[in-house]
Image (tube, grey):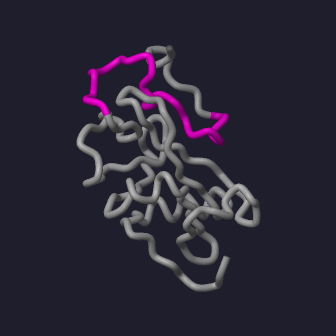
Amino acid sequence: MTDVSVLPPFQVSQSAVQAIQDLGGAVRIDIEDGGCCGTTYVFELVDPQSDAVAQDAQYGCPGAWLFVSPTAAPILKEAVLDYGATLKPPRFRIPRNPNVDNVCACRRSFGDPWPGPRQPTCRSYMPMPWDTEYEPPRAWRR
């Protein structure tokens, strides 16, 4: 890591920067199979000195580092990363991405056409992996 700011080739909202700082300063974005549209964004807290992020692109400034996996980097070019603190559950999401044609309504999944609400694979009801205190309302539980 360096002591200078490095801007990613996509937009990061102020709320996302604040969330990264509040979470300890280092978040990684990757993609994997899953979600109701077939491919999902994955967010995780990381140790910036870890070998797990050695191949990732590194963006940010001291106190708010964002690591982007080699598979997620081309998909995120010119996208927008946001954090919705008032969403239920609070979460990172990609509200706009010109590189994908089909997205889930929750903005966490992309790829195949959205199959509609209440899909068993939908990630909109899932809290972030580090959010162990969030308890979704009973009507949301699968």
Based on the picture, tell me whether residue 25 belongs to the magenta stretch. no
User: Is 92 left or right of 45, judged from the image as shown?
Assistant: left
User: Is 129 left or right of 14, judged from the image as shown?
Assistant: right
Residue 106 to residue 125: above or below = below
Q: Residue at x 49, y 21 (%)?
A: 137
- State the predominant SS element of the stretch in magenta: loop
Question: Which of these two is toward me, 24 or 78?
Answer: 78
Residue 1 to residue 44: above or below = below
Residue 2 in picture, x, y percent from top left: 65, 82
Magenta span covers which residues?
Answer: 112-133
Of all residues shown, which one is farthest toward the bottom? 4
User: Is 42 left or right of 103, judged from the image as shown?
Assistant: right
Query: Which quadrant holds residue 58?
Result: bottom right
User: How many numbered marks have been drawn onto this rendered protein structure?
Assistant: 0
Query: Which quadrant holds residue 7?
Result: bottom left
Residue 26 to residue 99: above or below = below
Q: Residue at x 35, y 41 (%)?
A: 107
User: Is 92 left or right of 21, judged from the image as shown?
Assistant: left
Q: Residue at x 52, y 63 (%)?
A: 18
Query: Which quadrant holds residue 10?
Result: bottom left
Residue 80 in picture, x, y percent from top left: 35, 58
Residue 6 in picture, x, y percent from top left: 51, 79
The N terminus lies in quadrant: bottom right
Based on the picture, tell me whether residue 122 belongs to the magenta stretch. yes
